[in-house]
Image: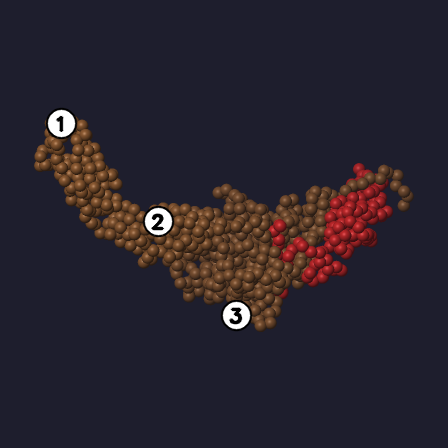
Chain colours: A brown, B red
Amino acid sequence: MGFPQGKLATLPFGPFTKFVVDSANSSQELTGAVRSARNAYLSGINRLSIRPGAQVAITLMDDQGTPAPCTSVRYSSAFGNGSIAIGYSSVTQKVYLYRLDAGVTGYYDTGGTFHTSTTAVPQCVVWSSMTVVPDVLCTEGLGTLYISHTVSSDANGLYWPTKQYTDFNTISNLPASGTDGSSAGTDTAYFNGVIAFEQALIGWGFGAGTTAATAFRPEMIRYSPPSFGNLQVSDSITLGDRVRSLAERVIGAGVAGNCCYFGGANMLTRLQGYGRDSWDKTPIDRSYGFSGPKSMVTAGDTLYYWSRRGPMRIAGFVGYYPVPPEPLWDAVALTATNVINSSKIVATFDADRDQVLFMYDMGSGVRAFCAFDVQRNVWLGPDSDFGISVSCAGIIQPYTASTATPPTGPAGPPTSASTTSIGQSTAQANWAAGDSSAQTEVSLAPQSTGVFSVIAMLGAGVSSYTFTSLSVSTPYEWRVRHVLNGQYSSYLGPTTPTEFTTAASTTLLPPSGLSVTELTAHSVSLNWTNSGESGVSTEVWQSSDGGSTFGVIQTVAVGNSSTTVTGLNNTLTYEFEVRHTKPGSTSSSFAGPVTIDMATGL
Amino acid sequence: MAATVYLGEEVGGRLFRYGSGITNIGQTVGASADYQLDVTTWDIVPATEVGDNVFRSIDVTFTCTNGYNVGITPIIDGVNLPEQTFNSAGTGEQQVQAFIAVRGARIAARVRTITRSGDIELHDITTSFWTIRTNP
């Protein structure tokens, strides 16, 4: 071959970002530069990076005397501020729940103590006597984990009750309401799957009670009221349009945006709303649904799922009129055709690389997977050398926000109650401070009602309070508690030492030594000696008709023993008398009268 | 710290942290137990389908974090030529050229890593050629 005469030229095969990959469909010309990319993800404009591998994070162990690894991992997801995993052992025939940290570096024991380890000890047993590897679906709602078995019941029986588990508490069966849909019943729920959506717990394939043939409704979707109250057996949504059909059996569900999508083998139904008054069901697709209970994953606001035809996606934020699902299988058509056991497909989302991963079986005994780059709308793979058969996938995001420190409350409640100085209208409450730096809230209630009213908020270090303006001969009770940084201690009282009854009514002693002296032609001065009783005031009574009628002209304040009377007529003779008064007591008898003639001053 | 995908194995009790290692911990498929990048381009046809070129080289640029061992397979008119391999220590931007001297209308390339001691980021794959005849 001679040396070419033309000019040397160059052409790029890229950019890679335009490509659509289908290594199984090489005869199809597609726009772009790359026909197949295995073990790759797009790492920038025109850049392909080799995919990282995977490391063993932890091994789930069974509960034998000498623990052995579980024979299958059935579920993994975030839970609380850590994560959970569910494993199955064909040796012990048990399904185990494991509490792990967010980084999956160890496990929590039943007491909540964390152990850094490469092997995990079960937190509890979910189901026993299980001879077949289970498929497990879980969801978390308001801090409770709900665990369901995808074949929990059928027309012949109820087998694996749905479980509920809260932090380090005993796992228990999920109760359902009675069949009338009223409050809590004694039945146990048997769901084939559960999902939390819009503050409600939603389950499907419900069975309950003892009559499996009538209770089992595989096309039914049951839900709790908002806040995860009692599951209402009578409140339900069907998947499709017909009343009862195994063809409409619910297989799985996924939440995207403000929609929850339920899928059967060949249909998809959208659910929106916030409870029984607003649930809105819209059948979306009557051809393609979910291929398996774990074949769907949410990326952004879009649900990606594997149907019996191949991968598809549907938007999560839509209006009243549904937007149909978008097929994605056309670019990987032959790959989709070659998938077997599609009911075991596992979908997950690698947020670091914007890839939706579908893991499936192509008959080689080794799971393969392909990836869809959700930002650039291109497929990568399929890869046939993943090397392990995957049964579940979970996305776990460690909490990175700093932990808020709760305010410090009182060190303890007040103690040592006593009630002293009980009078007709007063009483003194006494206590010992449980925290001398805390304020004290004082409450009082008549014993007849027991309804307390906050009387006072006392400063730090104060350990007594005097109640006033009490009614005579009335039973009262008081209670106190400390307040520090907005946190309250428990109450001291009401107990016997904080209960008291005010003194009965008494007659006051009279004043004495009343005398009168003319000051001017129209005024006089009155003087007397008080009885000495505390809190008494003095009423001054006057008569200008020779003592036939008296009337009150003044009330002299507590502690005073004289007063001046003015505005008198210098031609008349007046008579004066005084007596003590006090709220809650009977007024004293009068002192006087004393007489004065204003014309003579005598 | 970003969200991490954890995979549970179907046969065994292990939970895998996805995207954080090099080694393929499962069954070995092919010659390597590690994840290997394997990219095949679509054909490009510089002088139209019935034109004629002499293809000179396939040029590949990439970065590596701990050396590289890559193979380039030229594919002329759908026929694979012998794979040419390149390896070196080092880090950073790298260029390798697989020289060929073959006439043809179409060219494609397969670029793959053969063994792996670090990460590879593939930046570009180009070809150089002389056009002999263009039709029309």
Q: Are marks 1 and 2 on the same chain?
A: yes
The residue marked by circle 3 belongs to what chain?
A
Name the image quarter holding the N terminus of chain A: top right
Total numbered labels: 3
Residue at coordinates 41% horizontally, 46% vertically from top-left?
Answer: A459
Quadrant including the C terminus of chain A: top left
Q: Residues within 10 Å of mark 3 (few under 14, many from 20)?
A: few
Q: Nearer the viewer, mark 1 or mark 3?
A: 1
Badge 1 crowding class, 10 Å Cα cut-off, few under 14, some 14 to 19, many 20 or more, is some
Residue A543, how many percent across, how many down?
Answer: 12, 35
Residue type for callout 2: Tyr
- For marks 1 and 2, give the one nearer the viewer: 1
Distance from label 3 to label 2 (Cα)? 66 Å
According to the image, label 3 marks what residue?
A129
Earlier in the chain: of badge 1 and badge 2, it is 2
Along the viewing direction, whichever of A296 and B46 lies nearer the viewer: A296
The residues bearing labels 1 and 2 have C-alpha atoms spaced at a distance of 53 Å
Q: Earlier in the sequence, mark 3 or mark 2?
A: 3
Residue A44 seen in this snapshot? yes
Share a chain, discs 3 and 2?
yes
Residue plotted at (88% across, 39% down): A5
Question: Mark 3–mark 2 contact, CB under 8 Å?
Answer: no
Q: Secondary structure at mark 2?
A: strand
Instruction: From the image, tell me which residue sits under label 1.
Output: A570
Label 2 chain ID: A
Where does label 2 land, which residue? A465
**Residue flagged by tag 1: what amino acid is it?**
Asn
Which residue extends farthest right?
A2
As rendered, which of B43 and A193 lies closer to the eye?
A193
The answer to whether A41 is drawn above or below residue B16 in the figure is: above
